[in-house]
Image (cartoon, rainbow, N blue to C red):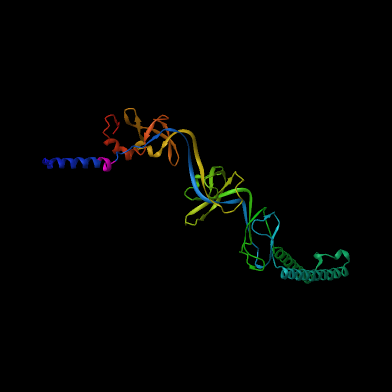
């Protein structure tokens, strides 16, 4: 014999389904309560910085070129060689110039002999017409003076030609003007070069230098003696300390089209490999203030107001501020070290106003 089972009323099924939907909503879909991010008031070292990218170089760099073109007879160095001031780097074929100099010297000898002949003739004439006391330019005839001046002028021109050929011959030898390392060397022996071709680059690494390209809008903030922190790509996050030693007195156009000024930063760490052109970046510290009470600038609201967390909730306070860095700002009065305040108070104001916490207290709103 079977016992009849009573059907569950539809209204109870509907209520059960609604209850299930409410439970699912609260578990999976209920919006997370808005959170208020806090920061702690503390002592900081604040810095104003100018950032710039750049490369490693030496204290001095010399691009070596010949005064005139010609056939490159030999190159005496290769990249990486250490050279000293006055050391021969390269030389042009000088055979034709040596011949030119010899011819110029022969011409000078002939012209000097012509001057001597004119003077002898004048002196013999003067001696025959008055003895030794009559010899001298003061007693020359107009014709004699003209002949002497013409001969001497020709002789002087020949002398100038000899000096010019000597200089030209000397210019076929290229020497280093500084002590350093060959960091670039392009043409090879046997090539014809011009006066614009760089034969070699010599870099003086007695002082490692970071050449930073500072945007022209920031250059007025940078001064000689400013301290800097430099990172070099080849050395990861390691920070190298340095000092601004030179501000280039001219601008140049950067690869991105902007106008920059090169600032040289002498680095203190001489363990950096002497490789010209290593890329990096620098933070030049233009101003600083140490051990001051500071907060993030994001915690400062309109009219220098902050929202302070208290035992009873949150309270709006007006603070006085001073020195500021790119991210933080000094608080000269209104807060104490260790207190907590709200970040982005303007953005969080609506959250604070909507909070149902009966202990929340907002003053001045």
Where does residue 80 sit, x and y in percent of width and height?
Answer: 65, 56
Q: Name the spot of residue 63 as percent of width and height, x first.
A: 62, 58
Residue situated in front as seen by the camera: 319 or 121: 319
The residue lying toward the viewer, choosing from 298 and 252, is 298
What is the x, y in percent for residue 251? Answer: 52, 54
- Is residue 233 shown above or below 108? above
Q: In this view, does 41 lie above or below 96?
A: above
Task: Quadrant for residue 240, please give it.
Answer: top right
The C terminus: image quadrant? top left
Residue closest to the far top: 311
Residue 17: % across, % down: 18, 42
* Rendering quarter of residue 141: bottom right
Residues rendered magenta in the picture: 26-31
Residue placed at 87% from the left, 63% from the top? 133
Can residue 64 be seen here? The reply is no
Of residues 200 and 258, the one nearer the viewer is 200
Magenta stretch prevailing secondary structure: helix
Question: Is residue 57 depicted above or below 94 in this figure?
Answer: above
Say whether residue 275 is left or right of residue 112.
left
């Amino acid at each position: 014999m079977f016992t009849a089972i009573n059907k569950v009323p539809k209204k109870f099924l509907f209520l059960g389904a609604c209850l299930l939907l409410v439970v699912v909503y609260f578990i999976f879909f209920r919006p997370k309560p808005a959170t208020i991010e806090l920061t702690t008031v503390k002592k900081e070292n604040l810095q104003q910085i100018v950032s710039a990218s750049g490369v490693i170089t030496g204290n001095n760099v010399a691009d070596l070129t010949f005064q005139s073109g010609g056939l490159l007879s030999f190159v005496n160095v290769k990249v990486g060689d250490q050279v000293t001031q006055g050391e021969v780097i390269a030389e042009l074929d000088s055979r034709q110039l040596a011949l030119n100099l010899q011819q110029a010297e022969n011409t000078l000898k002939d012209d000097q002999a012509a001057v001597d002949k004119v003077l002898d003739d004048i002196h013999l004439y003067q001696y025959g017409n008055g003895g030794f006391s009559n010899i001298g330019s003061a007693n020359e005839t107009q014709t004699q003076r003209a002949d002497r001046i013409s001969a001497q002028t020709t002789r002087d021109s020949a002398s100038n030609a000899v000096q010019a050929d000597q200089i030209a011959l000397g210019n076929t030898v290229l020497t280093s003007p500084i002590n350093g390392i060959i960091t670039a060397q392009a043409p090879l022996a046997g090539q014809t070069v011009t006066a614009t071709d760089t034969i070699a680059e010599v870099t003086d690494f007695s002082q490692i230098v970071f050449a930073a390209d500072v945007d022209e809008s920031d250059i007025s903030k940078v001064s000689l003696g400013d301290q800097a922190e430099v990172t070099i790509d080849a050395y990861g996050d390691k920070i190298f300390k340095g000092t601004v030693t030179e501000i280039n007195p001219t601008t140049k156009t950067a690869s991105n089209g902007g106008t920059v000024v090169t600032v040289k930063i002498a680095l203190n760490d001489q363990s950096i490999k002497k490789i010209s052109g290593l890329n990096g970046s620098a933070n030049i510290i233009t101003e600083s203030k140490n051990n001051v009470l500071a907060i993030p600038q994001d915690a400062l609201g309109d009219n220098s107001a902050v929202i302070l967390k208290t035992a009873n909730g949150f309270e709006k306070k007006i603070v006085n501020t001073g020195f500021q860095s790119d991210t933080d700002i000094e608080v000269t009065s209104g807060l104490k070290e260790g207190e907590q305040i709200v970040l982005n108070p303007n953005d969080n104001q609506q959250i604070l106003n909507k909070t149902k916490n009966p202990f929340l207290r907002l003053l001045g709103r």
